[in-house]
Image: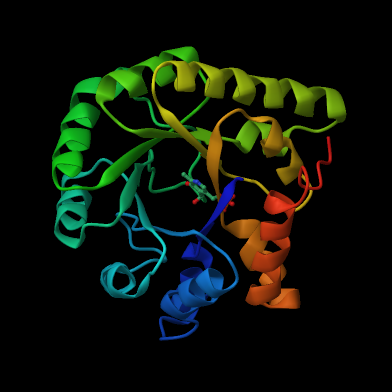
Amino acid sequence: MIKLGINVDHVATVREARKTVEPDPVWAAAACELAGARSITVHLREDRRHIQDRDVRILRQTVRTKLNLEMANAEEIVAIALDVKPDQSTLVPEKRQEVTTEGGLDVAGNLKAISQSVRKMSDAGIVVSLFVDAEEKQIKASADSGAQFIELHTGKYANARGEESQLKELQVLIDGAELALKLGLRVNAGHGLNYTNIGGMHKVPGLEEVNIGHSIISRAIFVGLDRAVREMVALLHGPGGSATI
Ligand code: PXP
């Protein structure tokens, strides 16, 4: 059964549009957990454009499932992680100008620096996951880094137009997961997943968890957060999900 992790950053995006106190991502996290989410993700970006330090610290106290801190491999943020001790940290590449996380992390090109952070955080009891494209080079480097998990970047699959190209991108994810499992890594996936493309994830071997933000928070505007989460949980837990491809 694939577990649902929810990224509540965009609740903070709305709050920061007014630099006020609502809506509160802490409330959103509790609502998501009550509706069946098994993990809450927040991305503490270096520019603090949505999630604030206060959010991470309160969520550490309130999240009852798993707190996953998405973060750049930056000294300041690693120090916060070591202090707050989320259950998991997911290292992602971060560029100030980007609208959202773009490619996967270049683990192969930064193996030494990434391995050092993986070690520091693992020693502090934090499970570390690396957000990577499903490329052999990056997956092998992830295994070498000592990380327990990778999160496969599903953006290309999500953006693929037409069945042929969607199936091609899905196969890339399947091959990536197979390699990761063979190397002893555990596998999560995320980025761009929504109510119509989630079905393909049932075909990815050994997939433990998907992390979804934008599509669930968007649907919540119309149907409420509780229903938006329950609908996604049903697609993940139902018989084979509602595979669209
Ligand atoms: N996983 C990672 C590593 C991400 O960076 C993001 C985007 O913040 C997500 C999952 C969620 O992506 P989306 O908002 O497109 O569902």
Answer whether residue 212 is visible to the viewer in this image: yes
Q: Residue at x 75, y 52 (%)?
A: 238
115, 238: nearer the viewer: 238
Residue 34 against residue 65 in the figure, above or below: below
Residue 107 against residue 38 in the figure, above or below: above
Q: Quadrant of the C terminus?
A: top right
Position of residue 121 in the picture relative to residue 142 (left or right): left
Expressed as whole percent of the image width and height from the top left, the position of residue 188 reads 50, 39
Answer whether residue 194 is visible to the viewer in this image: no
Q: Residue at x 34, y 71 (%)?
A: 59
Expressed as whole percent of the image width and height from the top left, the position of residue 142 reads 35, 24
Residue 120 against residue 96 in the figure, above or below: above
Position of residue 219 in the picture relative to residue 124 (left or right): right
Q: Residue at x 26, y 26 (%)?
A: 146
Q: Quadrant of the N terminus?
A: top right
168, 51: nearer the viewer: 168
In which quarter of the view is residue 93 placed?
Answer: top left
